[in-house]
Image (cartoon, rainbow, N blue to C red):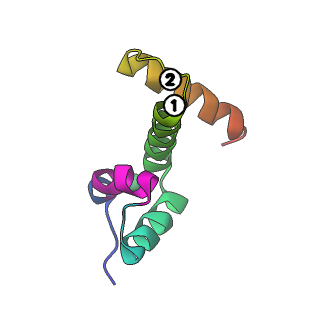
Amino acid sequence: MTVFNCQEVLDRVVFYVDGEIEQAERYQVDEHLKGCKACTQEYAVETHISTMIVSSDFNPISTQELVDRALTQYREQNRGI
Ligand SMILES: [Zn+2]
């Protein structure tokens, strides 16, 4: 079985977050995220943005602000990493 590299994971992380990814690819992304902080961080950002967009109180703000908020929340949830 081939293993996704970072670029391949980042290409799919949006679909992964939305649940629009094949089972085999989901597994690959899962396995990669376990060992890659950079992609895990990207995944956290995408998850956060996705959550904010679907929530009713979503207000359009700058992408940078979204990323900053996501990273702050991610760090709070993952102290010690
Ligand atoms: Zn990676």
Along the line of sight, which residue is nearer the eye, 17 or 73? 17
**Above or below, 66 relative to 46:** above
Q: Nearer the N terminus, badge 1 or badge 2?
A: 1
Q: Which residues are magenta?
A: 9-19
**Above or below, 40 relative to 76:** below
What residue is shown at x 70% (from left), y 38% (from top)? 77
Q: Which mark is residue 58?
A: 2
Q: Give the residue type at disc 1.
A: Met
Q: What kind of secondary structure does the magenta stretch mostly adopt?
A: helix
Mark 1 Cα-neighbour bin, 10 Å: few <14, some 14–19, many ≥20: some
x and y, in percent, of residue 12 in the image: 32, 56
Q: Quadrant of the C terminus?
A: top right
**Above or below, 19 relative to 3:** above
Are the two marked residues, 1 and 2, in contact with CB atoms closer than 8 angstroms?
yes
Q: Is residue 6 magenta?
A: no
Q: Which mark is residue 42?
A: none
What residue is shown at x 31% (from left), y 78% (from top)? 2
Q: Tag 1, which secondary structure?
A: helix
Mark 2 Cα-neighbour bin, 10 Å: few <14, some 14–19, many ≥20: few
Q: Give the residue type at disc 2.
A: Phe
**Residue placed under numbered mark 1 in the picture:** 52
Q: Is residue 14 magenta?
A: yes
x and y, in percent, of residue 74 in the image: 61, 35
Q: Quadrant of ligand 1?
A: bottom left
Along the line of sight, which residue is nearer the eye, 38 or 47? 47
Along the line of sight, which residue is nearer the eye, 39 or 18? 18
What residue is shown at x 53% (from left), y 29% (from top)? 70
Instruction: Specify whether tag 2 is near ligand 1 (CB below 8 Å).
Output: no
Toward which corner of the image does residue 32 lie, by quadrant? Answer: bottom left
